[in-house]
Each structure stands twice: as C-alpha cells, then as structure tokens.
Amino acid sequence: MNVFKGVLVGGLVLMSGSVFAANESNQSFSKAKKMLERQVYQDHRETIYCGAGFDAKKNITPPAGFNTKKHVKRAKRVEWEHIVPAENFGRSFSEWREGNAQCVNNKGKSFKGRKCAEKINVQYRYMQADMFNLFPAIGAVNAMRSNYNFTMLPAVKSEFGSCPMKIDNRKAEPPVSARGRIARTYMYMDKTYPKYSMSKQQKQLMNAWDKTYPVSAWECKRVKRIEALQKNKNLITQSRCETAGLWKKA
C-alpha cells in the first residue's frame, strides 16, 4: 500500500522521493543567459572548468597554458553550459524522442530532438532555462564535454593544456575546483524535476563529491542571486551554505 508522505514547508512540498519547487518564472534560455551574465556573474566573471576570465562582450581571457586543437573559434567565447546536459532530461519528453505534428520546418520536413521539445513543451523550456543548472564555460570545452556524464578518468590526460578538464570515450572528469558545484547541481535537478533522475552510479559519485568538496562563499552568493531572479530555491546548496555559516541574510 502506497502512502503519500509530505510536509509543506514555506510553499515547498517535501516528500520521500521528493520534489522541490521548480523554475516557473522564466522559460527563455536566451533570457536566462543574459540574466546570468548581467545580474549574477557581473563581478565574478570566471568559467567553471578552467577558471578563464570573460568580459561583458563574451570574450574569453584563457588561463596561461590553456590550449585546444578543436573548436578553436569557440575557445574565444564564453558559453553557458548545462551541467546536467539538456539531452539527459530532454529525452524524457516525447517531443525530443519522437517529434510532434507541429514540428515541421519551412520545407515541410519533420524534426525532433531539442528543437522540437523547446518549441512544443513548456515544462522542457523551464528546465532548459533553469539558471541553477547553467555555468559559464569556454566554448570549446563546452563543445567537447557535449552531453557526457561525469566520472573519474585517472589514466587520461587533459587535452586543454593547463586546464585539468579531462574528456575521453564519451565521459568527462572535471577539475577538483568544479566538483562540489557540479555535484550539488546534479542533486538539485534530481530533487526538483520528476522528468530527470540520476542513475545509481551517478548518485554515488555526486554524493561523494558533495561531501568531499564543500561550498565556497561565491557558490552561496551565486545561489542567492539566482533565487532572487528565478523565484525558487536551491535547497541542496542552501543547506550546505547554512551548515558552513555562509548563508547570510541579505
């Protein structure tokens, strides 16, 4: 017999297997990127994987020793990376997998995938535009990370020179400095959106990274800023910030 167990806390329904309040304020991915650039990262212009600087015009200042042989043009620009890749949750939508009668281009050809899900499904658009899941990255690194899951790759060397981001065989290992933020982002998405669920293996890795790599003052400030703009909470990171004494009232 299934028994619903829930507690209402400040407008959030917390339950076993639980969901937190989701993004329901902005469904535009383009608007989300602009808000992040202008109202969240305006005084902390640093990419998540390589610590590269970037300016208000999206130009990258790479760290000393960074290099890439692929996507060279994209290496000059900042892009906004879905930490939990859009495909990882997008494929749970029928429009992504199968298309829709309304997904037809101007030549009469049907299409599916991300473009169709974005056109048809408002829930997908809210997930895609959730700013808690978006971080700045060097465009080339974003391109090469693609939709690969994170894991540990001890025998692999970085292709990016001084930036210790590793990618191999459709897997990626992020630098130590990024692991805690990545873990808490995965945990937030898993708890917030029923359309996304981590695998058992991913949960084990993210739980380990969450415990090993604690929050920083910047991570807590970032979450506070996004919360004010997006009007929903990231209770995963907030709880870690409170424990660390970094969740100060505005």
Image (tube, rainbow, N blue to C red):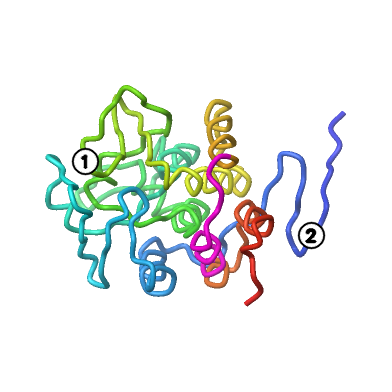
Residue 183 appears left or right of 117 = right
Which residue bears the numbered disc 1?
Answer: 160
Task: Determine if the magenta segment contains residue 215.
Answer: yes
Query: Residue 171 or 197: which is nearer the viewer?
Result: 171
x, y percentage for residue 152? 41, 28
Residue 246 versus residue 120: which sits nearer the camera?
246
For the image, the number of numbered tags is: 2
Give the position of the C terminus as an image quadrant: bottom right
Q: Residue at x 39, y 40 (%)?
A: 99
- Residue at the far bottom in the pictured view: 250
Kindly state the secondary structure of the residue where label 1 is placed.
loop
Could you say which disc has been placed on residue 9 in the image? 2
Q: Residue furthest top?
A: 155
In percent of the image, x 41 and y 33: which residue is there?
A: 149
Between the C-alphas of marks 2 and 1, the distance is 45 Å
Camera-nearest residue between 114 and 245: 245
* Label ID, residue 83: none
Dot 2: what SS? strand
Residue 31 x, y percent position in the rendering: 39, 68
Residue at 20% from the left image edge and 41% from the top image edge: 161
Q: Is residue 79 magenta?
A: no
Say which residue appears at 39% left-offset and 45% top-offset: 101
Which percent across, then down, holds residue 48?
Answer: 37, 52
In the depicted structure, whether residue 179 falls above or below residue 75: above
The amino acid type found where label 1 is placed reads Phe
Majority secondary structure in the magenta region: helix
Magenta span covers which residues?
212-226
Toward which corner of the image does residue 200 lie, by quadrant? top right
Packing grade of label 2 (10 A; few <14, some 14-19, many >=20) is: few
Q: Position of residue 170 (x, y in %)?
A: 32, 28
| Left or right of residue 140, residue 175 in this image | right
